[in-house]
Image (spheres, grey):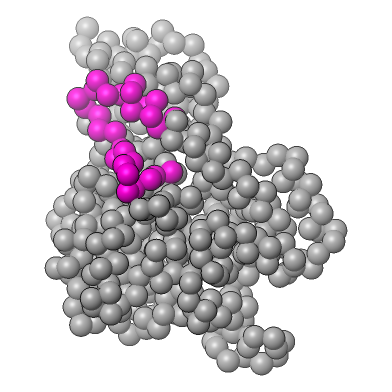
Amino acid sequence: MNTDQSAEATMSAYPRRPKIPLAKPVFDEEMKEAAVQALQNERFVLGESVFKFEEEFARYCGTKFSVSTASGTAALVLSMIAEEVRGGEVLTTPASFVASANSIIHAGATPKFADIDLETYTIDPAKVRLSLNDKTKALMPVHLYGYPAAMKELCEIASKRGIAIIEDACQAHGASYDGRKVGGLGDAGCFSFFPSKNMTVAGDGGMIVTNDDTIAERVASLRDCGRAKGSKYVHRMLGFTERLNTVQAAIGRVQLRRLDAWNERRRQIASKYNELLSDLDDVITPPNGDSIAWPVYHMYVIRCQRRDELRAWLERAGVEAGVHYPEPIHLQPLYREMFRYRGGEFPNSELLCRDALSIPMHPNLTVDEANFVSERIHELYQS
């Protein structure tokens, strides 16, 4: 019997199991009650829960201001418009969801890329230094998979060049760097509340945090049709309709209170996976936190040999797995067409996208389920 036949025989010996999902959003009775209360007692648009959620989220991130939006992408777009990047370039990483770069185009700027450090999966400060030019107006580090980028070095670079930092923290709610929450380290930080994230508003939603009152005022106007503060029909900016609705904000307030406990559980699961998978030469586990960078494991992403084969193998065993992301941004069809990328420009990002596999990670994942996932991975590589 060859290796493939042996592996298939091993798999067929296992009974079908309930699917172990990659992510599992929480929506319980407390959140349902908060949503109903908001529906019954508040304005549907910009009701009291919206402003309370903003106050609480700013306090959580350690910033002066917080402005909610209809999505994480909207948060990124409006932050860059507020920073007046139009006509310039914004430097970011190609190893991210495409919205990171799309938002730069929507804000009227040109996305440029710097490769990642494979030790952290985040933008490499050394590559950033080589990629800056006179057209660069902002730097957008992405805290990918919930791991903080090297903010000390990036902030030093930005300060010397006089450019803004807009943190894409859409996957990093509660992560910290040098004792401070991400999002509050640059000029503005942007979060997404999409259902797969560490906390959600039961749909699309976003948040911008900042210590700059000018940015906060501009973003608040931009998300609300460009209205002047305190006025209903005076519009000083070319705005959008990108408001977070009141019901979602009410749900978000409950989720925010649970976030730290959920993140701690994610770290426990990650530690368990690290232990279980440490003996496999074919698998590289995600970067661990240290005294400076404190991740929150939005996803637990391994790098592995035979990635697509392992994904199919896990799916047959009832384990959902994902690829985040199959292509780096610069090799997406749109970016190939617009900017003539051919491949090979950012080798670390391209390697990550070839090898990366996300395995189940959520606060309700049990130790037994983590053991089961590990056992199935071992079966493939040890058969």
The range drawn in magenta is 269-296
Residue farthest to the right? Answer: 40
- Against 309, residue 15 (above or below) is above
Residue 166 is situated, as x and y percent measured from the top left of the image, at 39, 68
Give 343 or 226, whichever is nearer the viewer: 226
Q: Is residue 222 visible?
A: no
Residue appearing at x 20%, y 65% in the figure: 128
User: Residue 368, relative to residue 263: is it above or below?
Assistant: above
Please report the residue visible at 25 percent of the width from the left and 13 percent of the height from the top.
383
Q: Is residue 143 left or right of residue 251?
A: left
Residue 207 percent location from the top left of the image: 54, 63
Question: In terms of image quadrants, where is residue 247?
Answer: bottom right
Q: Kindly identify the residue that appears in the image at 35 percent across and 58 percent down.
A: 142
For image coordinates 40% across by 52% down, the residue present is 179
Answer left or right for 28 relative to 300. right
User: Per the image, is 293 magenta?
Assistant: yes
> Residue 181: horizontal and vertical position, in percent?
45, 55
Front in this rendered view, residue 114 or 124: 124
Which image quarter holds the N terminus? top left
Expressed as whole percent of the image width and height from the top left, the position of residue 12 reads 40, 11
Q: Is residue 372 magenta?
A: no
> 65 or 380: nearer the eye?
65
Number of numbered discs on residues? 0
